[in-house]
Image: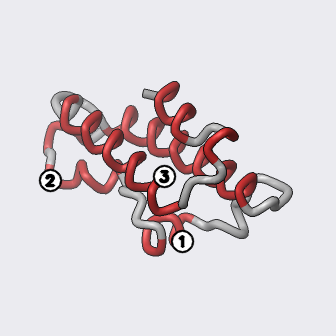
Amino acid sequence: MVDSLSEETDRRRVKLDAEYVVKRLNRKLTGWANYFCLGQVSPAYRAVNSHAIQRLRRWLCKKHKVRGLGGKRYPDQYLYEELGLINLPSRTHNFPWAKT
C-alpha cells in the first residue's frame, strides 16, 4: 500500500490536478481499508494515513514549487476539508474490534 501511495504522488505526476490525485488516493485508501477492516486495524490505519499525508504534502510542495515539507502550508485540516482526503483512523470509531 505504501508503494502504491508513493507511486500516485510521484514527482512525475505534478502536472496533474490536486483534486484528481486526492480522488485516486481516496479510492486506494478506501479499498485497502475495506479489505483490512477486521482485527486490530487502528495502528495500521494510522501508519498508512500518516504516509499518505506526508506524500501528499510533498507532492503539493513540488507541484507549487514550495520548499520544505509543507506542514505549515498544507495542514491536516486543509488536506481533509479542502482537498477531501479521507482520514483512515476516523473510520475505526464504529469498529469495536479496531481499538488499540
Comparing labels 3 and 1, the label whose residue is closer to the camera: 3
Q: How is the image coloured?
A: secondary structure
Could you say which quadrant of the image residue 65 lies in? bottom right
Q: Quadrant of the C terminus?
A: top left
Q: Residue 10's x, y, as percent? A: 63, 37
CB under 8 Å between discs 2 and 3: no
- The residue lying toward the viewer, choosing from 52 and 38, is 52
Q: Secondary structure at mark 1?
A: helix
Q: Earlier in the sequence, mark 3 or mark 1?
A: 3
Q: Secondary structure at mark 3?
A: helix
Check residue 21 in the rendering and tell me which mark sits there, or answer none: 3
Q: Amino acid at mark 1?
A: Tyr
Q: Between marks 1 and 2, how big is the CA–CA gap? A: 25 Å
Check residue 78 in the rendering and tell me which mark sits there, or answer none: 1
Q: Is residue 83 left or right of residue 41?
A: right
Q: Is residue 70 above or below residue 46?
A: below
Q: Residue 80's x, y, as percent? A: 44, 66
Packing grade of label 2 (10 A; few <14, some 14-19, many >=20) is few
According to the picture, the residue beneath numbered tag 2 turns out to be: 94
- The residue lying toward the viewer, choosing from 10 and 52, is 10
Residue lying at 34% horizontally and 39% vertically, measured from the top left: 28
Q: Residue 13's x, y, as percent? A: 61, 44
Q: Quadrant of the N terminus?
A: top left
Q: Residue 81's x, y, as percent? A: 43, 73
